[in-house]
Image: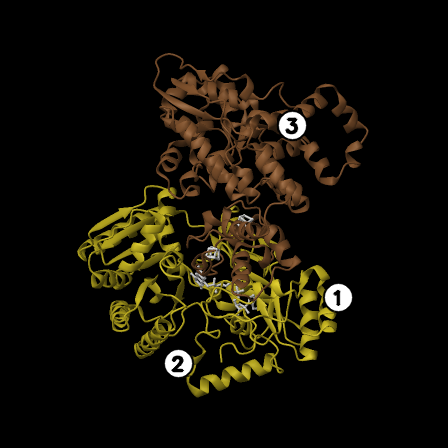
Amino acid sequence: MDYVKLINCMRCGMCLPHCPTYKETFLETASPRGRVALVRKFQEGELVESEKFLEYVSLCLDCQACASACPCGVNAGELVAEFRCERKQEQGLSTMEELILRKLVPHPDRLEAATAPLRLYQRTGLQKVVRSLGLLKVFPAALGRMEGLLPKLPEAPLRQTISEVTPAVGEQKGTVGFFLGCVMSLIFTEASLATVQLLSTLGYKVVTPKDQKCCGAPNMLGHDIDGLKEAARFNTDLFQSQELDFVVTDCGGCGAELKKYGHHLDGEAAATAFSTKVRDISEVLAAEAGALKEKLKPLPLKVTYHDPCHIAHCQGIRSQPRALINLIPGIDFRELPEADACCGSAGTYNIEKPEMSDRVLSRKVQNVQKTGADYLVTSNPGCLLQLKKALSEATPPVKVIHLTELLQMSLNG
Amino acid sequence: MEHSFIKALSEIVGEQYTLSDPESLACYGYDSTPELQSRPGVVVLPGRSEEIAKVLALCDGAGVRVTPRGSGTNLSGGSISFDAGVVLQTSRMNRILEIDEENLTATVETGVITSTLHREVEAKGLFYPPDPGSMNISTMGGNVAENSGGLRGLKYGVTDDYVMGLKTILASGELLKTGGKVVKDVAGYNLNQLLVSSEGTLGVFSEVTVKLIPKPQAKKTMLVHFPQLEQAALTVSHIIAARIIPATLEFLDRTTIKCVEDYAHVGLPLDVDAVLLIEVDGHPAQVEEDAAGIRDICERHHCSFFQTAAGPEEALKLATARRVALSALARVRPTTILEDATVPRSCIAPMVKLIQDTAKKYDLLIGTFGHAGDGNLHPTCLTDERNPDEIKRAHQAFGEIFEATIAMGGTITGEHGVGVAKKKYLPKLVGESGLKVMRGIKGAFDPRGTLNPGKIF
Ligand SMILES: Cc1cc2nc3c(=O)[nH]c(=O)nc-3n(C[C@H](O)[C@H](O)[C@H](O)COP(=O)(O)OP(=O)(O)OC[C@H]3O[C@@H](n4cnc5c(N)ncnc54)[C@H](O)[C@@H]3O)c2cc1C
Ligand code: SF4
Ligand code: SF4
């Protein structure tokens, strides 16, 4: 680890009020400044990797709110992740991790096959039985949580049903590649269909290569650097072999990862070129605001927006989604207090650290309720999963949808 | 620290809020002061005043030292325990107890974050002016203890001007109430004001009542570029001499401008010696008149560009330049040593010049920014703590800068406090008699020297 990055922290504390875990605990050990200090003290040999040490370090959501806030360019979350990664490299992956990260995640067909029983489970009504009998309580806690979060799965993953080429409606303005994203394709099929429809309506030919692999974010999360590089190289080659103006994604997590391919592959020219072409769907649509506005029909809804960490903090995209929502005639947009605070989903954090995740989530839910909105818009599958569940149970319930779904509703009138 | 003592503490504040693992102690061994750190013996986070009282009584009886701490953003080492004692953090005491719209006061627990109070009172059309650069994280207790100033200090004054009443727990655990909601009070010594800026050495504040004022109706923010430093400094003096009192009159020198621009991209010029950030507020007609007067003075002093913010968003962007100055400077080199020299405002130009010359003499990179309207400057030396020679030169340079400050009739700290960082300069400033009186006061409040030992003197 680069020691200079650690000593760059001047301990000014500017990051503290932005850190979700600090806001919940008021503990220096659960703050970005504290986390940098912990890692630094470890490097300096003053602290050892005790159980407590690991507990503190793993409480970080890696939401990168601290990075947005830090005027000195320190990224506490990333430093902690890097630290965990380095330790992991020394220990090596476990067999289970090896299996999931190397044998399952990179192969969409296997991943889809693995979730097939789930679809069956839901469709046969088995899910209802299990839920009503409270059988979930019998399952190990983590599995139970995961099951509880799952919305109804679509009939089939989008990757299997979408055509490789979706022609532009009307005069063709350009060609874009569409990056599917595992969870978007598996679970939020409707939202991704909306994304493609919006792009084609605006005059883009949309190319969706079926061979694409997972972006590599799970590998990053699992500290599997080799797996990450493999994914980066594969996707770079696949998309760079086509003539594309942009590569568009509607998954905040994928977007953040794809934009880092150049960095992951140590500045390799092709990877860097690929990364600079990657756009979040909101970036593309916001640039077409004029053309889009003409096509939108009124929607008299009260709407608020939650900034996914991977969109706001990792990609610096904040104004575009709001501008797009405000394009819709008749929309009553209400700014969400602490809109860019993490919702507690954070990859697998909600399963690994349920207690803190719930605290962070309930703050989000309370803030959403303060707005009085009937729709919460966001654009990252992790947030969608987490917030859909929580807000469907809130009183009054709030509907949670992807940004492109809202725009499509307005488009179709 | 003995296990039985830690146990006794945890019986007062709860186990969850008594931290003694090495990791926690490492994280409470610093504040925002460069170079300084030292691990406490234990950290407690009391949730109410009664708990503070019990903790203090216990420690006072056992001869254990206590260092109060808010958010640890101070720049003088004030919240670090240097004798492995107890760090007492107030962050859980964060309730706004009352906003009294009839008396125009607010009463809060001292762990309340300054900007939270701003938000709550502004929602009611009221205004709490003190706004230290750290207001998004500093606590009200820390502000009172350091007598913090802010960007609005020129017109509205500093924390001291707003503290009306305090609840303070003395080292013995006794509660001392001073001041209150009355606007006039001349009964005996003014203990209330004595406690403000006591840097945690006289007592632990648990509640503070502050004065509020009506929120100014209008404001205008301006950013002015000056190719020459002297002209910027003269402008400051002449604005004041013209009887215009802006709410904010801030200064950034060339080095600072460059760093801020590199970081925040707010469109600052890279080819000028200085910029002034000026904000006027009050009645709309007065604001217009003041702004026009300022523009006239700036132009007469050969400013190269005069920008007025079009709306609140642009105003915020301009003010951001000043707010992030320190942290932006800190990007350049790993270790940032920030000072707080304050001179009579007529001496701004010679002081800035002297700082620049001293930087050259010691071959250092020093950026200067600050509250020009108050004469409060922050020369900030950009160094690397791994280079002992450079650090030594930095301290030598600051020694000279402080000598000059005192010679000009200035002071060694305008708002950050003496703490441990500026202890060695204090005798020169206040003299033997000054120190003797201060020590006597300390003895009257805290006879056993329990609270924040080793700070100030
Ligand atoms: C980026 C940055 C910008 C800053 N800008 C400014 C500025 O513009 N103006 C300014 O004046 N300062 C500024 N500061 C300094 C600092 O923020 C202030 O001194 C602030 O008031 C400290 O508040 P805190 O809650 O962090 O207190 P701490 O740093 O925790 O404590 C400060 C002192 O107060 C004592 N203390 C804390 N709470 C209590 C209590 N309840 N009772 C008794 N004693 C207590 C402590 O023992 C310590 O001596 C800045 C600091 C930073 C890092
Ligand atoms: S991480 Fe950045 S914002 Fe946080 S204390 Fe360090 S320098 Fe300041
Ligand atoms: S990444 Fe998020 S949780 Fe982790 S330190 Fe930064 S702000 Fe806190």
In what element is the residue under mark 2? helix
| Colour setup of the view | by chain
Q: Earlier in the sequence, mark 2 or mark 1?
A: 1
Circles 1 and 3 on the same subunit: no
Residue at left 42%, top 63%?
B157
Q: How many marks?
A: 3
The answer to whether B307 appears left or right of A303 in the picture is left
Q: Which residue position is annotated with label 1?
A: B11
Q: On the rendered image, what quadrant is the N terminus of chain B found in? A: bottom right
Of the residues shown, which amino acid type is indicated by label 1?
Glu
Look at mark 3 in the image and give the residue it sits on: A114
| x and y, in percent, of residue A399 in the image | 61, 27
Say the numbered circle drawn on residue B429. Answer: 2
- Same chain for the residues under marks 3 and 2 in the image: no
Residue A214 is situated, as x and y percent measured from the top left of the image, at 52, 32
Q: Which chain is brown?
A: A
